[in-house]
Amino acid sequence: MWLGIILASLGLLVGLLIGFNVPLVLPQAYAKYMSVAALAALDSVFGGIRAAMEEHFDQSIFVTGFFSNALLAAGLAFAGERLGIDLYLAAVVAFGVRIFQNLGVIRRHLLKK
Amino acid sequence: MAKLNYYLPVMLVALVLGIILAMQFRVTNYPLEGVPINRDRELANELRELTREIKVMEEEIADLEYNLEQIQTGQAEVTDAMISEVAKTRLGAGLVSVTGPGVEVILNNPPHPDGRPGGSLFIIRDEDMLKVVNELRGSGAEAISINGQRLLSFSEVRLAGSFINVNLTRVVPPYQILAVGPADQMEESLLLPGGLAEFMQDVGIQVTVEKHDSLTVPAYKGDWSTVYAKPAQRG
């Protein structure tokens, strides 16, 4: 059970190291898209861990879910900016709710065992 | 171990999440750190700008080099002009020996009445010498010397005892006066009937006037620095 969390943490750590050492900085203008993409990725990770614990994990669903979520979120942010509506808030709220739900489910699984 | 199959993609996504979070963190907290993503365009712009600047500078270099060349040739001309001016001035001031046509006047004291060598009652005085010099100058002499002493604008001809001082140097008879200038004119003005030569011969001075096609008047050899006279300020 804990293996998934450890592996996920390890991946996160390595990613952070890479991100901090890449000699590239995105322009400030893209920071908004990046933030919703980060939320989408966070949601996917929690969703993946939860699915693995519930024993119905599917790689293809997981990977496509991650990309479609991230792209839709970024697209919403982009469209929102063009229209003058803060559409990225929709993504933030949706992902935030799901993250907490997933976290709750994971907690239950970990405590049950 | 089947779980590993599940967790590997999760780990990869977590990796991507980590990268995204780190980048986001850097963008938010250190906006000017690192290399911006459109750095290449910036650098290209800079390169273009600098290339243009180089071209402008090169044009300026060529321009300045041309100017320098002009100035150098001008400088050479100025130097030549100054050298020739100095030479002219030295010539006019009597600081160089001059050669040219002229007359040689020899004055000697009258011989002793008794035919004995030695001083006579009458000797050539400074006035006689000055009269000759004046006559020569009046008829166009350009350079005069008395017994090798060049006459300058500040030279004196002065009786000192029974001798004559020229340029503070004692000269003794026979006095040889050399004058470069229009020889015919000078000779004529000296030998004019009733003129200076005749007058002096009447008094008893031995006068010889001789024309020369080429004679050399020596340069002034003394010190000619001025102590009191300074160039006047103009205006």
Image: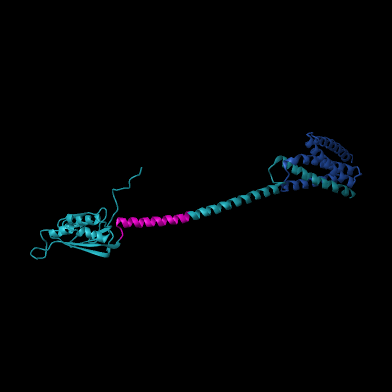
Chain letter tied to cyan: B
When the figure is inspected, residue B199 is found, relative to residue B17, above or below; the finding is: below
Closer-to-camera residue (B40/B65): B65
Kindly identify the residue that appears in the image at 23 percent across and 62 percent down. Answer: B104
Percent across and percent down for residue B71 are: 47, 54
Question: Which quarter of the image is occupied by the C terminus of chain B?
Answer: top left
Closer-to-camera residue (A85/B190): B190
Residue B55 appears in the picture as rendered: yes
When the figure is inspected, residue A99 is found, relative to residue B95, above or below; the finding is: above
Kindly identify the residue that appears in the image at 27 percent across and 65 percent down. Answer: B213
Q: Quadrant of residue A113?
A: top right
Chain letter tied to blue: A
Q: How is the image coloured?
A: by chain
Percent across and percent down for residue B126 are: 18, 55
**Start-end of magenta stretch:** B71-96
Percent across and percent down for residue B138 are: 24, 54
Residue A7 appears in the picture as rendered: no
Closer-to-camera residue (A112/B69): B69
**Residue furthest out toward the left:** B114
Q: Is residue B94 magenta?
A: yes
Percent across and percent down for residue A110 are: 87, 40
When the figure is inspected, residue A13 is found, relative to residue B202, above or below; the finding is: above
Left-right relation of A76 to B66: right
